[in-house]
Amino acid sequence: MTQHAEDLDTSWAVHWTRPQRGEWRADRHGRVVGEVKRDGEAYVATRGSRTLGTYPSLGAALDAVDHRPLSTVQPDRFWTLVLTTINVGIIAAIGLVATALLR
């Protein structure tokens, strides 16, 4: 699959810098959003103050930091949320009716 430059949303782009040997820093619009540090043979990824994990390759660690935050609900997730909410509501209503009838 080929992704063209015009398909990329540059407002979400993460820019990587390398302040020191064995360190990579991700920033978005000048704000640091994450870091990757080499720790022996592994790479430790952090996003904000949270450690995401230790990864065997640099690429995996960079991908862990670079993932897009869920700022808008994607359509398939939206419908999953709506249907789950409806189902939970129906089950709760059935439980309330059953409780009222059995008393």
Image: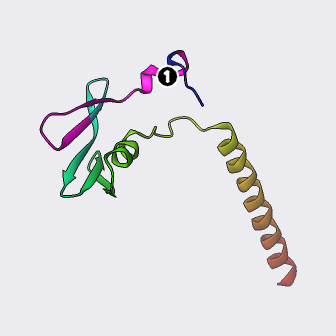
The image quadrant that residue 4 belongs to is top right
Identified at 40% across, 43% down, the residue is: 63
Q: Position of residue 48 (x, y in %)?
A: 28, 45
Q: Position of residue 7 (x, y in %)?
A: 55, 20
Q: Outermost residue toward the top?
A: 6
Q: Is residue 17 magenta?
A: yes
Quadrant (top left/top right/bottom left/bottom right) for the C terminus: bottom right
Q: Nearer the viewer, residue 8 or 93?
A: 8
Give the amino acid at mark 1: Asp
When the figure is inspected, residue 56 is found, relative to residue 22, above or below; the finding is below
Q: Position of residue 14 (x, y in %)?
A: 36, 30
When the figure is inspected, residue 68 is found, relative to residue 37, above or below; the finding is above
Q: Residues within 10 Å of mark 1 (few under 14, many from 20)?
A: few
Query: How did the renderer colour the structure?
Result: rainbow
Look at mark 1 in the image and give the residue it sits on: 9
Q: Which range is magenta? A: 6-25
